Image (spheres, rainbow, N blue to C red):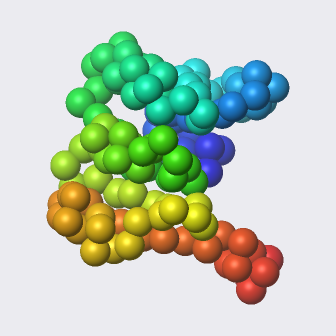
Amino acid sequence: AIQYAKFIGAEVYATAGAEEKHEFLRSLGVKYITSSRNGNKFEEDMKTFLKEQGAEGIDVVLNSLSHDDYIGRSLALLKPGGRFVEIGKRGIWSHQQMFEARPDVMYEKIAADTMMEKEP
C-alpha cells in the first residue's frame, strides 16, 4: 500500500509501535509516522503533520487499529467524502455504524488474507 501510494504521489501517514517498525517505514520513504499504541499521541501528531503539510485532512484511511478509538480518531481526520478501508478483523465497525457516524464516507472492509489465498 505504501509503495503504491508513493507511486501515485500521495503523502503517506503511518502508525507503528516499535522503533524498528518506525525505522522500516522511514526506509520506505514515509516521513510522517506516529504511534499505533497511544491514541492521544496519534491524534496530536496527526494534527501537527496535517498542519505542517497545509492539509485540511486525509483523503483515504487504510485502517487495522480498533483499540483506543483509532477508528473514531481517524474519522475525525478524514476529509468530507473520504474513503475508509478497513483491513482489521476485531473491533471493526459495521457499515451501519459508519453510516451513522459519517454518511459521507465510503467504507469498505477488506479481508486481505482471504484475497491473497484466493488470488495469490
Q: Quadrant of the C terminus?
A: bottom right
Q: How many marks?
A: 0
Q: Quadrant of residue 93?
A: bottom left
User: Is 81 placed left or right of 110 in the picture?
Assistant: left
Write the residue at 71% across / 25% down: 22
Q: Quadrant of residue 94?
A: bottom left
The foreground one among 61 and 39 is 39
Most extreme residue toward the bottom, as rendered? Answer: 118
Q: Is residue 115 above or below residue 107?
A: below
Write the residue at 65% across / 70% down: 112
Write the residue at 29% across / 26% down: 55
The foreground one among 6 and 96 is 96
Inspect this view and state whether residue 27 appears: no
Residue 86 appears at what percent x and percent y? 49, 62
Inspect this view and state whether residue 5 appears: yes
Q: Is residue 1 above or below residue 88?
A: above
Residue 1 appears at what percent x and percent y? 61, 51
The foreground one among 92 and 49 is 92
Q: Is residue 55 above or below residue 105?
A: above
User: Is 96 placed left or right of 108 in the picture?
Assistant: left
User: Is 104 placed left or right of 27 in the picture?
Assistant: left
Write the residue at 44% across / 26% down: 40
Residue 119 appears at what percent x and percent y? 74, 82
Residue 107 appears at what percent x and percent y? 36, 66
Q: Quadrant of residue 47?
A: top left
